[in-house]
Amino acid sequence: MSLVRLVYASRSRLVEADRRAELARILETARRHNAERHLTGFLMATPGGFAQIIEGETGNVAETYGRIMVDPRHGDLRLLAQDTVAQPQFAGWAMAFAEHNETTQFIFGLYGVSPEAEIFEQPLDVLLDLAGELASARA
Ligand SMILES: Cc1cc2nc3c(=O)[nH]c(=O)nc-3n(C[C@H](O)[C@H](O)[C@H](O)COP(=O)(O)O)c2cc1C
């Protein structure tokens, strides 16, 4: 089985009033679908955007990204990588999640991500390093 890692960034279309509830719904759906497909990964959210890493079998990753792409809760998706990898980086997480808030802003800030410098503008290497750092901070 070949293991693929897909990374994309997008602009959030969540409205502030529904943001909390909508993020909870996204995660609940993502974790349920991903567990069924043995997908793992990391979703990062800032006030204006998302960045997500999805790992798993090629067909499952492609089918899932197809659904995510057409989700009206975000837009302007930029596919940054779709690589074969030897090992999953987020094994055990049907979808880990980190948000830019008072607790995490220091780590986001280390990687130059702030409400002004949004996550969807960041290059691939920054997103991968940031996800790794956030994952180790919560482990
Ligand atoms: C930022 C973002 C990340 C998402 N991540 C996933 C994901 O990892 N896996 C998944 O199945 N759906 C994910 N979704 C939800 C899908 O876009 C879609 O709503 C869902 O898979 C459809 O599920 P349903 O047919 O059960 O309603 C995400 C949505 C958004 C906006």
Image (spheres, grey):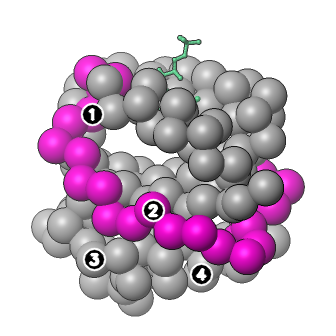
Viewer-proximal residue among 84 and 137:
84
Work out whether mark 4 precedes mark 3 in sequence or the reverse, and give the earlier one: 3
Viewer-proximal residue among 38 and 31:
38
The kind of residue on which mark 2 rests is Gln
Label 1 CB less than 8 angstroms from ligand 1: yes
3D distance between C-alphas at marks 2 and 1: 20 Å
- Point out which mark residue 123 bears: 3
3D distance between C-alphas at marks 2 and 3: 14 Å
Q: Element at badge 2? A: strand
x%, y% of residue 46? 34, 54
Residue 135 lies in the magenta-colored region: no
The residue that mark 1 highlights is: 74
x%, y% of residue 68? 42, 31
Work out whether mark 2 precedes mark 1 in sequence or the reverse, and give the earlier one: 1
The residue that mark 4 highlights is: 133
Whether label 4 touches label 3, CB < 8 Å? no
x%, y% of residue 124? 35, 76
Q: Residue lying farthest right?
A: 92
Query: Residue 18 falls in which quadrant of the image?
Result: top left
Q: Magenta region: which residues?
A: 71-93
Q: Is there any visible trace of residue 87 in the rendered image?
A: yes
The kind of residue on which mark 3 rests is Pro
Whether label 2 touches label 4, CB < 8 Å? no
Whether label 2 touches label 3, CB < 8 Å? no
The residue that mark 2 highlights is: 82
The kind of residue on which mark 1 rests is His
- Determine whether, in the image, residue 50 is placed left or right of residue 40: left
